Amino acid sequence: MEKLNTDTQNADINLVIEQVQAGDKQAYTHIIRRYQQQIFLYCYYLLKNREEAEDAAQEIFIRGLEHIHHFVPTVSFSAWLYKIAQNHCTDLLKRKARTFKSFIQYKLNLKQQPIYEYTNLIHELLDQLTLKDRQILLLRSLEDYNYEEIATIMGLKSSTIRKRYERLRKKLINYNEKGGKQIEHSFKPGR
């Protein structure tokens, strides 16, 4: 039944994409509603700031609309949209890293935000990882993409993604065994 729902959703999205490509920009709101939460969470866990993630998600949807005529259904639309998100967040992080002032502002914003134990755990874990590893973890564990889809999004080979993910799992499980909080249950085993 889940496969049928996924196929129906993909068919619906493909119809909406065709409408938007034909000039019906209003139809794009269906795409935004469908992917808004997922894209926001992806940006949030990469950028580690709610406001920046909200701004990034808006920019990603704007870029998606501007470039939707380039979309060809050789990959899923969500993978195409995540590729835009990955590029945008990577650019933002590079700009952020260049400026010490941005780093100070990030720390101030972090102190002003309410702190929740689960959020701290997620940030603690993600801080242990490189940007590419965070992206692989988020796409695999949160979005449930397979290795081929992640490879398409990140521009890497699926075998590279599979190996990195397995090393990443071992690294975080090892972190858990050395005194980190219980995290092993959140990982999907390799398929």
Image (cartoon, helix red, strand yellow):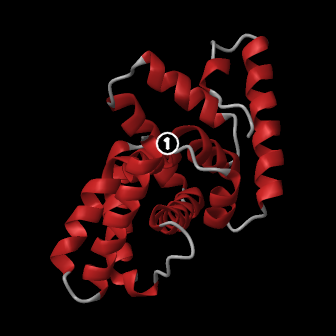
Give the quarter of the image for residue 183.
top right
Q: Is residue 19 above or below residue 59?
A: below
Q: Is residue 67 above or below residue 105?
A: below
Q: Position of residue 88 (x, y in %)?
A: 49, 66
Which kind of residue does numbered mark 1 sit on? Tyr
**Foreground pick, 94 / 126:** 126
Q: In which quadrant will I find the C terminus?
A: top right
Locate residue 87 relative to residue 55 in the image: left or right.
right
Q: Residue furthest left?
A: 26
Q: Position of residue 135 (x, y in %)?
A: 61, 50
Q: Position of residue 186 (x, y in %)?
A: 60, 25
Q: Is residue 16 above or below residue 66?
A: above
Locate residue 90 relative to residue 5 in the image: left or right.
right
**Foreground pick, 15 / 169:** 15
Locate residue 115 relative to residue 80 in the image: left or right.
left
Q: In which quadrant will I find the N terminus?
A: top left
Q: Tally the marks.
A: 1
Residue drawn at x 39%, y 29% is: 111
Give the quarter of the image for residue 77.
bottom left
Q: Mark 1 packing: few (<14 Cα in 10 Å), some, or many (20+)?
A: some
**Foreground pick, 84 / 105:** 84
Task: Give the SS element for disc 1.
Answer: helix
Residue drawn at x 69%, y 59% is: 148
Residue drawn at x 54%, y 66% is: 83
Give the quarter of the image for residue 108.
top left
Residue drawn at x 19%, y 83% is: 24
Residue highlighted by disc 1:
45
Q: Position of residue 119 (x, y in %)?
A: 45, 26
